[in-house]
Amino acid sequence: MTDTAQTAAATRPLSRGRIGEAAVAVADAEGIGAVSMRRIGQELGVEAMSLYNHVANKDAMLDAMVELVAAQLIAGTSSLDAPDPATDWRGALRARALAAREVMLRHRWAPGVLQTRTAMNLDLVRYYDGVVGVLRAGGFSNDLAHHSLHALGSRVVGFSQELFDPGAAADDASEEMLEAMAEHVPHLVGMLAEVAHDDPASTLGWCDDQSEFEFGLDVLLEGLERRRASTVVP
Amino acid sequence: MTDTAQTAAATRPLSRGRIGEAAVAVADAEGIGAVSMRRIGQELGVEAMSLYNHVANKDAMLDAMVELVAAQLIAGTSSLDAPDPATDWRGALRARALAAREVMLRHRWAPGVLQTRTAMNLDLVRYYDGVVGVLRAGGFSNDLAHHSLHALGSRVVGFSQELFDPGAAADDASEEMLEAMAEHVPHLVGMLAEVAHDDPASTLGWCDDQSEFEFGLDVLLEGLERRRASTVVP
DNA sequence: CGTACATATTTACACCGTAAGTTGGACTTG
DNA sequence: CAAGTCCAACTTACGGTGTAAATATGTACG
């Protein structure tokens, strides 16, 4: 058994990068809950404690994971033929957000992990810097760019948190449950009924995540444009 | 020992509600990480396993916790003299969001827990129903109300996720780190410098959460109002 | 060659959620 | 009153977690 471990280690020596890759692969395939030191070690043909030679602790391993995602984020937006921010900052920023969203959809665990991370990651900060660059090129003051960053929030990195997933919740109880609570939530029931009726394709998983994301993004972009336009003297 | 446990149980018998209250109190005081079955049991003078008589598992205990928060949410918005939605839906909704925010600020663990919860909670759904009610009274179609719910996202329940807390991150490295990465993130550094200069009160914890929250909320409310107004025939 | 160094392993500990079985007191019922 | 039932609380145990500390093992260099 020592044999296999040795050969595995000799083949490609352990490293922070390889640990991060393995962890990302496991998280992609089985969710973030499957990511443990023992499991990642096993994935690399190595004992759990060996990981600590390249990674301070589990938190640092999670940092390595977001590092890889952040790298994909800037990679995905650099190889992007988006509108020129100087003439169309909205188009440029929109393209960035949608490109970022594709990265996040490949790593569904990432939003949750990102929110728990307090440590700065250089690539992630660089991504934000790019966003600020777009805003500045589009004519935003530093102050308005700052507010805009807050207002857009996680949308600039490609996701907007949903408080709960109505589709998943609808799976178990669905119709029966809605009837039961109909008297308590008349407005919601009415809204759902009409929305579902207008678009029968979505039975009870009635929310098209992608278009809802774009709707919210566009509302924000429009409102920010109005504020930007009102700060330039006529 | 059996004595004290019995008297404690006899004084006020264990219940789902009491368990939730104890868990909320612990989470408020020491963070959600301190909430474990053993700890909550200890808090109630009872062994951990006794909790399972009133709560299916830890997940159900977390559900009980959000139940209490949701109750505070509807309680806080019902006893609220907000504008009449029919004449000022924006003011009505804004008041709701800010009232909800106060609840969330009392329970800083709640946003994180809410996002992991998939089960529907009646009070929470009722709160959302109230939001839809405001929008409908304000002249929104069901379809637009639906989109608006998505666009506003967690803001209607009083918080907007921040990807990371710049204030916390700035604590350790701060100036030195900013200089080191200045060449990689010129726009960000420039923005921070100017924002910090304009408002010296906030040294490097440069973000006023409350006003940023309101800024984003107002941008959204404005954009939604424009869409609503454009759907009514002139 | 011998020694130092880096890496991987082993062992151990404290914590977690919870399945299973046991106790003991408070009711209901004959 | 006695017997039976019930149920909330307790005890024990198991497999999982992250990780500190000590140990083995290879590789590189003076």
Image (cartoon, coloured by chain):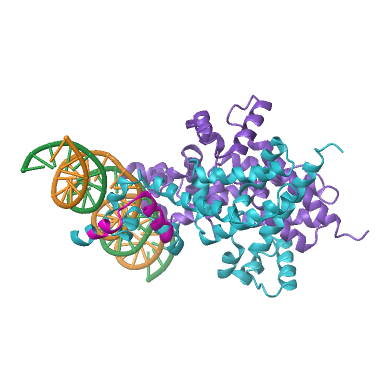
Chain colours: A cyan, B purple, C green, D orange
In this view of the protein, which residue sits in the foreground, A221 or A170? A221
Residue B229 seen by the camera? yes
Residue C18 horizontal/vertical position (percent): 37, 59
**Residue range highlighted in magenta:** A7-26
Query: Any magenta on residue A19?
Result: yes
A26 w.r.t. A93: above or below: below
Percent across and percent down for residue D21 are 21, 39
Magenta: main secondary structure: helix
Q: Position of residue B69 (x, y in %)?
A: 58, 47
Side of C30 where B82 appears, left or right = right
Q: Quadrant of residue A9?
A: bottom left
Confirm whether the magenta stretch covers residue B96: no
Q: Position of residue B223 (x, y in %)?
A: 78, 51
Q: Which quarter of the image is occupied by the N terminus of chain B?
A: top left
Quick check: A44 above or below B203?
below
Residue at the (65%, 73%) spot, across then down: A203
Nearer to us in this view, A118 or A191: A118
Return the residue found at the far bottom. A200
Residue depicted at x 63% and y 50%: A156
Q: Is residue B76 visible?
A: no
Q: Nearer the viewer, residue B152 or B96?
A: B152
Query: Horizontally, is B140 left or right of C7 in the view?
Result: right
Which residue is most to the top? Answer: B200
- On screen, residue A122 versus residue D2, left or right, reads right
Number of numbered markers: 0
Q: Quadrant of the C terminus of chain B?
A: bottom right
Q: Residue furthest right?
A: B234
At horizontal 54% and vertical 54% (from top left) the residue drawn is A75
